[in-house]
Image (cartoon, coloured by chain):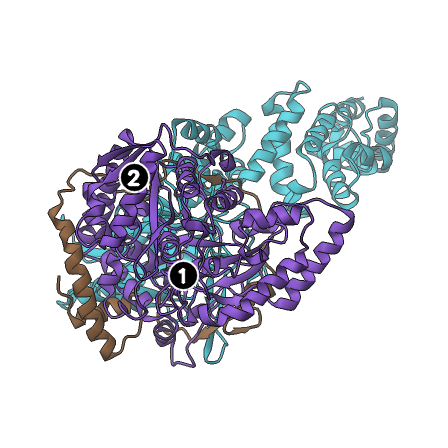
Chain colours: A purple, B cyan, C brown
Amino acid sequence: MSLRKLTLFELKDKFTKGEVSAAEIVKAYFQRITVVESKVKAYITPAKKDALLKEADDLDYKLRGWRKIAPLMAMPIAVKDNICTEGVKTTCGSRMLENFVPSYDATVVSRLREQGYFLIGKTNLDEFAMGSSTENSAFGPTRNPWNLACIPGGSSGGSAAAVAADLCAAALGSDTGGSIRQPAACCGVVGLKPTYGRVSRYGLVAFASSLDQIGPITKDVRDAALMLQLIAGHDPLDSTSADVPVPDYQKALKFTMRGMKVGVPLEFFAEGLDPEVELAVRTAIIKMQELKAEIREISLPMTTYAVATYYLIATAEASSNLARYDGVKYGYRAAKEKGLLETYMKTRQEGFGPEVKRRIMLGTYALSAGYYDAYYGKAQSVRTLIKRDFDEAFKDVDMIVTPTMPTPAFKLGEKVQDPLQMYLSDIYTISVNLAGVPAIVLPCGFSSGKLPIGLQIIGRPFEEEKIIRAAYAYEQATDWHKKRPTL
Amino acid sequence: MAYEVVIGLEVHAQLLTASKMFCGCGTAFGAAPNTQTCPVCLGMPGVLPVINRKAVEFAVRTGLALHCTIAPMNRFARKHYFYPDLPKNYQVSQYELPICEHGWLEIGQNGTSKRVRIRRAHLEEDAGKNLHAGIAGASHVDLNRAGTPLLEIVTEPDMGSPDEAVAYLKTLRDILVSQKVCDGNMEEGSFRCEPNLSLRPAGSKELGTKVELKNINSFKFVKAAMEYEIKRQTKVLDEGGKVVQETRLWDTEKGETAVMRSKEEAHDYRYFPDPDLVPLRITEEMIAEARKSLQELPEAKHKRFVSEFGLTEQTAAVLTANPVVADYFVASVTAVCTSGASKTDVSRDIANWITVDLPGLAKDFWTHIPAGEIGELSALKRKGEISGPIVKAVLEERLKTGKSVAEIIKAKGLVQVSDEGALEKIIDEVMAKNPQQVAQYKSGKEAVFGFFVGQVMKASGGKANPAKVNELLKRKLTQ
Amino acid sequence: MEIRKEQVEHVAKLARLEVSEDEKTTFARQLSGILTHIDQLKELDTAGVEPTATVLPTDNVFRDDEVRPSLSQEQALANAPDQADGFFRVPKILEDR
């Protein structure tokens, strides 16, 4: 079996046993990149081949006399390009940061670095992670490896496509309203959005600070558990990272769901859900029953209001977070203008793409004098109600199973002109961020158009263990994760 | 028409923390541009703030010193406006829930006192600095100051004249300095004030339209700016006009204020809770801790120095003006008192050295000579081992060489001469040299006694024990 | 909720975004559409419901008052579009904050 097809766990195992060298791994992946990257366009900044090969050679040489293997040594891992990497361009898919080179690593990146990972590339995304299709990148769209005419989902479309197309062994994404889970579903891979506070946000370029969370995108559930293990935990640099112990997630990998109560929310199977998606998800729920899970119907009545609430809170925070891009300290600056005000206005007009501007406008409006109470303030109160919905549901069940997206991946360009329709495609993922709870997405079938369909399992805060266990049990009882696109 | 002046004040006090409000950069004044910055205070993408515990402690301590209510629940909010010295284009501040509210302080003036109410005091981060002068076609930005913790202290409109306003500012500054939370340096910008001022017909209950004044960097100019503004507004009203609500800038060179921004152009700051910071809860324990760390207020300390140490009002005032000096004084006195002296016995001498001799020798003498050595010096003097006039020479030598007080006295042979035989010999010599004065004394002109003391002290190189000299002289002259 | 062109202009100025005539029209239409969807929140009674600013149950996260190394001047200015004599250089500031 060729190296690139191995899961992270398998590759790590081979490397640890000395069956494969770091140089061989790097060569295999670069060969794959040469062949398919031009079709998929998962990367904004791929690693420099010569530099990485040298790093690999040095490692191989060093390991000859000293076999101490860190968990991710020589593992080619891709990082979404809104996560800061010291000395490596971090563009956020924006003209604004086209040449921005951070002098610091995100905490997740320094943790991966400590574990010996190889940064195989910085992946494409919707500009500043704002979008559901990766079409909003200033550097062109990424394609879905299953069907190059379709979107890979977004905003972590580059990371999901890179994993699906074997362009990396695993990847990091970020999720504000579904940006890990929705592309994972579109590309038929596993995506995990941890509990808000589980993983440090330090060095993740902020979109909406109260919703953003970094998480893994991987080839299977075991890999997701491994990656989460390595990036989770308290960080003194992030006041919103929780000081909660991180359990051993590998111990959660069991083949049964015995004793687990699974909720199925009525509202997630209502109008607008594609019948093929519904069938795949319902079939998955039956499979869970076979795995001895107890299935219960539940209600999350506030679901209807999630998109509206999200688009007020996320855009308000974004309008604030993106105020710093003014062409003074770093980033793009418009060519010589008369005064400061003109420079600000031109810089931001030329540096940001249309979707980012739209969201800055909406968020600024929602916070502006006279509208705060009606919009931002109202949304914060509704957020409380949405969170209560989940609190109530979790009194009865251990987890909630839902579709991830109303439809399989749509065609490129299909929704570009209609932002509201685009926003509504996040309807099943958004409330998870508003409630701050964890969720994992994994493949549960294919549409008649041969596009993957994703199953979402939502857990209680800081109970990633349980959803990993359920996802693993389901995955091992099915074959979906073994399917790979032909490119 | 006669008008009544109504003044309120906003003060921005930089807190004396070692590091910034939300990051570990230093806060020292005067570093080379952009050398005290890091990704956090530069507002780089992706970085996050973490609250400096000390800044919170200082805010609570100040709140207690100003008799404020301390808010149990606090949230930081973002205040948005675009300006190059504000790296994130929002300032992390407090809006709905300031940490301190409803306090007061007492100002004394011409023998009467008045209470000025404090509306609120809240924590926020300072901006950097924009520089314009002498730069063609551009401005420069230095972000060293960005992120320094500030306490913004806002009064109710309780002051009725520029003099009262200045008295308030001085009292507030003394309190902040005494609490060791701010160095009070107006020139370096660590204590900045923005008055707002309005006029109303004398006797009227309603407030007039207020004008905010900015860009003032000394007590002198605060007064001048307010006086100018009173004249300007009086003229406007006398001519039947209306004062416009606006912000005006003080121009030091012209001695005038000029419009900076009208109310119509007022900002829409779009405050909202900062999602990067979790709520700040001030617990009972934190307040108790702050109460313990609360330093004596200047007024009370002054009174205590007079009663406890038997000092004059004036000496007490000099000692308490700088809390470091006051502490140094107390430590010196305590050091000698452990060897059995009473406070009032030694205080006058020590106060004298600290307020007169030492400042003349070194500006920051307290960093060079440990208070314990001052105590030692005082103890030696009490025991009669050294004389008063010698002390200054010892201190000078101490600063110059760094040798201990004991070493200097020994090495220089400065030990006081109390031996009767030796002193009698000197006295005899002095009397022999001055027969005329001896005759005068004997004929009843006792004023020349002082002359003899002086001559004997001089002949002994200042080492003679003055008490012994007095005693022996009296005996010899009346023989 | 209808958003007029003048409101687009006002909000764009607040956000320091230059917008073309075309963008004004497009934004007015798109924002109106989104805000109409958002208006469904009005049907919810949220009287007495505490707002959620963050889902974390924690409070009082502090750091000690310790000085850490700063960046060098060169590092601080490394990404600056324009700089001079150790400063960030910007067009002459004519307006006040």
Label at residue A286: 2
Secondary structure category for the residue under label 2:
helix
Which x, y percent locates residue A26?
62, 61
Q: Nearer the viewer, residue B285 or B201?
A: B285
In the rendered image, residues at marks 1 and 2 fall on the same chain: yes
Which x, y percent locates residue B211?
25, 60
Camera-side mark, 1 or 2: 2
Image position of B375 with respect to B250: above or below: above
Secondary structure category for the residue under label 1:
helix
Q: Nearer the viewer, residue A135 or B99?
A: A135
Q: Residue at x 29, y 39 (%)?
A: A286
Which x, y percent locates residue A43?
49, 66
What's the residue type where badge 1 is placed? Gly
The part of the image, by quadrant, that contains residue A350 is bottom left
Label at residue A157: 1
Label at residue A474: none
The part of the image, by quadrant, that contains residue B368 is top right
Which x, y percent locates residue B9?
32, 51
Question: Looking at the image, is mark 1 or mark 2 earlier in the sequence?
Answer: 1
Image position of B467 with respect to A262: above or below: above
* Residue B38 appears in the picture as rendered: no
Distance between the alpha carbons at the discs numbered 1 and 2: 30 Å
